[in-house]
Image: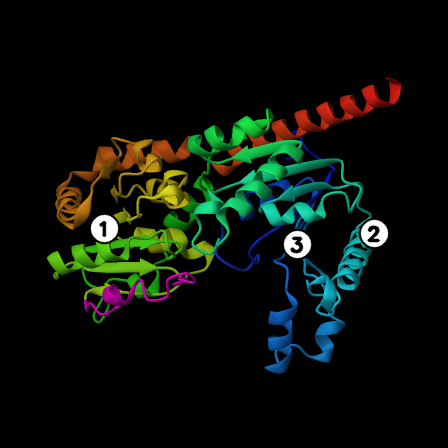
Amino acid sequence: MAGVLAGETILCFAPDPWAGLWRNRHQIMTRLARANTVVYVEPRAYLGQTWRAARRGEIRLADLRRPALAHVRDGLWLYRDPAYAPYAGRLSGGPLTAWLRRRALRRALATLAAGAPILWLLRPFHADQIGLYDEKLVIYHVTDEYSGFPTVTDVPGFVRAEEALLRRADLVLVTSPALLASKGPHNPHTHLVPNAVDYAGFGAALASGRRLPALADGPGDIGRPRIGYVGALNEKIDFDLLAGIAALRPGWQFVLVGALDLTGRPAKADALRRLPNVHWPGRVPVEDVPLAIAGLDVCLLPYERNEWTRNIDSLKLYEYLACGKPVVASDVPAARAFAPLVRIAEGPAQFAAAIEAALAEDPAGLREARRAAAAANTWDLRVAQIEGLVAEALARRTGSCRLQVTG
């Protein structure tokens, strides 16, 4: 059923591929595509990486002729810049490849009979797309304190670029109160839209009776109790904390479901990987995430406490609660927001004690309380809120244009 927003074209410039780990943008764009045309523009390729891929034989002549658009479902399309037009510096053909990219995307939009689009930007460097497609609205969606990412080397420069985009955007969406406090002063049209969960989808997966093979009970499988985390295994995870807990409780099995992605600190998880009671099943498809969580006895949010996690609104927490699972978390605002449904701990000894308490609890009433909290935070509710905010921004922008014309 169509919501408040219908018949629009949304150009979503993404920092990660559609087929990667599902994040809030995947949930939002899937729902917006039911009544709108959504073009999810996959991450930009740069000249250096394109050249290296070509030398390895990963780019062939057929790739140069590959269709730019791929249909996913409903009104959702994936778009990838042509292989012959990577991002490059001015002295290495940058202006030419930029022109080729603009032409290719405009042609793709023409095949969809798309109208003037709404630009949905997810990183400050996407600001270079503003003004190229006769857009009717610019949305900047802030899901983390990006300046706290370990891959950001020039933090002052990054902050300046983000503040410039905040001022240019017609609408800014943020996912946590801390982000609202830091981004709001730069744009009066900044709104808090927290993360959420596909509650109905989780319920259907749990009711299906399926089990994730790696976590199925049986001979040769991972034993119990299973203490785990399901999600992005990146630099925000406190791997030393996990190693400390696992060493204190060698009889517990620790299960880390997700792809290990430590670009900034590749050796960060080495000590944890050497422990025999720690298991790494790898990333699972989005439809199997509920099954991975269901196979755990206690779920963890083992975050480091820093600027990144101070601003985070953890998707995992909503998903854990949707499965009714007990949660033990580092002392970060996202976890505090759901107290007393979440146990807060600091250090290996406190975490071990909190996990023991969770394992010993009588789960019936607590499980329903957790699921009720998740049911109040669904993606359908969030997207309805977003649709209303976008509709208001469109009306505001239209009214501003009329004033400019008649003034």
Q: Quadrant of residue 273?
A: bottom left
N-terminal-most mark, 3 or 2: 3
Q: What residue is shown with label 1? A: 297
Residue 329 falls left or right of residue 149: left
Q: What segment carries the magenta color?
A: 259-276
Tell me the chief SS of the magenta region.
loop
Q: Residue at x 69, y 79 (%)?
A: 60
Q: What residue is shown with label 3? A: 41
Residue 176: x %, y % from top left: 44, 34
Which residue is at the front of the view, 205 or 169? 169
Residue 324 falls left or right of residue 143: left
Q: What residue is shown with label 2? A: 110
Relative height, residue 18 to residue 371 (above, below) = below
Q: Quadrant of residue 240?
A: bottom left
Q: Residue at x 75, y 41 (%)?
A: 117
Q: Residue at x 60, y 76 (%)?
A: 52
